[in-house]
Image (tube, helix red, strand yellow):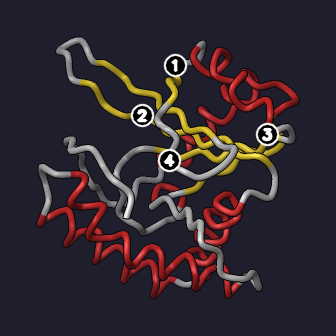
Amino acid sequence: MMGYEPRKYAVTPYRPEWAEKFTREAALVKQALGGDALYVEHVGGTAVPGLSSRPVVDLLVTVKNPAGIDRYAFSLKAIGYEPLPDRFMGSMRSFAKDITYPHGVVERHATLHVFPEEHTSLLSMIDTREYLLAHPEEVKHLDELKRRAFAKHQDDCAGYRRDRDEYLEALAKRAAKWRGRHEEEDIGAVL
């Protein structure tokens, strides 16, 4: 199980404006990375209508040249994204865009995951999103699980994530099987 740093967070009912937030951020990312960004996808809980989520939009960027991923840091920093510690095995990077309000509160706005084509975690995130969009009963079950975990761990994002991890790993495996892929060790469902 991956380690999580303790921090404050919120889980809120689905909001249609998350799709608009994704569209705005995707346009910025595409402009910053130019032709290196092959695809920009909306993944994670905010990409699934009806699913409660932390109000942080997850963007998945596919690039052709994995050797060049580190060079994107400068372009992404220019639009507000800071590098995060490496979370997945292999050649990918994550970045976060935080907003600091005048009264000093810092809020995570978006998380950006940059993967080379065909990376296992990239495929898993897309498969999981598509599976949830096709299975409303699964969305309802996951929504209830996330709400219970938040009620139990309102001041501990790490505890919230730990309560969901086992279910999310099994969900990602179901999604891979549904999409006709073999189960992989590196599961990357971001929800």
Q: Amino acid at mark 4?
A: Arg
Question: Are the two marked residues, 2 and 1, in contact with CB atoms closer than 8 angstroms?
Answer: yes
Q: Identify residue for label 3.
A: 66
The three-letter code of the residue at mark 3 reads Pro
Mark 3: secondary structure:
helix
Residue linked to disc 2:
109
Q: CA distance from mark 4 to mark 3?
A: 16 Å
The kind of secondary structure element at disc 4 is loop
Which residue has dot 1 on it? 80
Report, in whole angstroms, how far the alpha carbon at label 1 lies from the one at label 4: 20 Å
Contact? badges 4 and 3 (CB < 8 Å): no
Q: Earlier in the sequence, mark 1 or mark 4?
A: 1
Q: Which mark is residue 129?
A: none
Residue 62: x and y in percent read 76, 45
Who's the residue at 45% across and 87% down the image?
137
- Residue drawn where x is 58% and y is 81% of the image: 173
Distance, label 4 to label 2, CA atoms, is 19 Å
In x, y percent, where is residue 152?
11, 66
Point out the image quarter for the C terminus. Answer: bottom left
The residue labelled by disc 4 is 87
Name the residue located 57 percent from the left edge and 17 percent from the top edge.
77
- Disc 3 vs disc 1: which is toward the camera? 3
Query: In the picture shown, does residue 58 fall above or below 149?
Result: above
The reply, left or right, for residue 79 in relation to residue 55 is right
Looking at the rendered structure, the secondary structure element under dot 1 is loop
